[in-house]
Amino acid sequence: MSRVFNPQNSSRLLSEERKEWLPPKKILEACGLKEGDQFFDVGCGNGFFSLPAAEMVGSEGEVHGFDISSDMLEELSERRAESDHTNIYLHQVEAEGLPENRMPGLNGRADVLFFANILHEVEDPGEFFGSYLRLLEEESGRVVILDWRYDEMEPGPDLEERLKSGEIKAILKENDLEIIFSKILNKRFYMFVGVSA
């Protein structure tokens, strides 16, 4: 990743301000997440979405968190231990994406494949995104991309690091995904949901 979030700033990811900007439960409900689902959180960090998702999918569902940072995964592991959720599984991955030979047991299982504020950090967003698509449940799975809007503002990444909405739509379409939902969440973020076309 070329613009990776610094784990030393991880407390920002769990701030009350961020919860106001991105209310996790409301966003996960908008994704259609439900009890029994398999939720795959790419770039899970310290679990801003993973822990609320674990509660929503319940004991019959699973949450799989993927991150390149051992520090972030360790923090999420500690938060998991403090909670009563035993359905969260953590995976350390490479910055370039998910190699074909990694985690074959997870192939085609994700009911929700979730990319929150991660694609703007990677060198090749399309290639990175495509490497995870084999994890998507083909018939009914949903892909969710949530990222910073292409607007100059603080806080957030520099403008040249952000993805335009057209770039995100192109990534979905290039991977044969139909956009069923797109919304400007607020002045900072937009969200797109795609399904197999």
Image (cartoon, grey):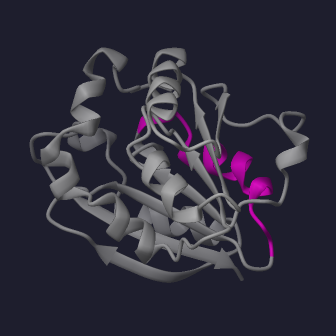
Q: Which residue is at the front of the view, 157 or 53?
A: 53
Residue 131 counted in the magenta span: yes
Could you tell whether 111 is left or right of 72 in the image?
right
Query: Which residue is painted at 34% across and 19% down in the image?
Result: 6
Measured along the vertical axis of the image, is residue 97 above or below residue 32? above
From the viewer's side, name the closer residue of 21 and 163.
21
Residue at the spot x=80%, y=72% of the render? 138
Q: Is residue 53 above or below residue 142?
A: above
Q: How many marks?
A: 0
- In this rendering, position of residue 95 left or right of residue 139: left
Q: Residue at x 49, y 47 (%)?
A: 50
**What x and y, as percent, mark residue 64?**
65, 44
Taken as a whole, is the magenta stretch helix, strand or loop? helix
Q: Is residue 136 above or below residue 44?
A: below
State whether residue 88 is above or below residue 189: above
Quarter-of-image position of residue 8 = top left
The quarter of the picture where residue 90 lies is top right
Task: Say if the magenta span includes residue 125.
Answer: yes
Image coordinates of residue 187 in percent, x first then y, are 14, 63
Q: Position of residue 65 (x, y in %)?
A: 59, 40
Horizontal relation, residue 87 to residue 169: left or right: right
Q: Locate residue 189: give its quadrant.
A: bottom left
Between 36 and 118, the one lying in front of the other is: 36
Magenta-colored span: 121-138
Q: Viewed as shown, does residue 139 lie left or right of 142?
A: right
Q: Quadrant of the C terminus?
A: bottom right
Q: Position of residue 173 (x, y in %)?
A: 61, 72
Residue situated in front as seen by the camera: 94 or 72: 72
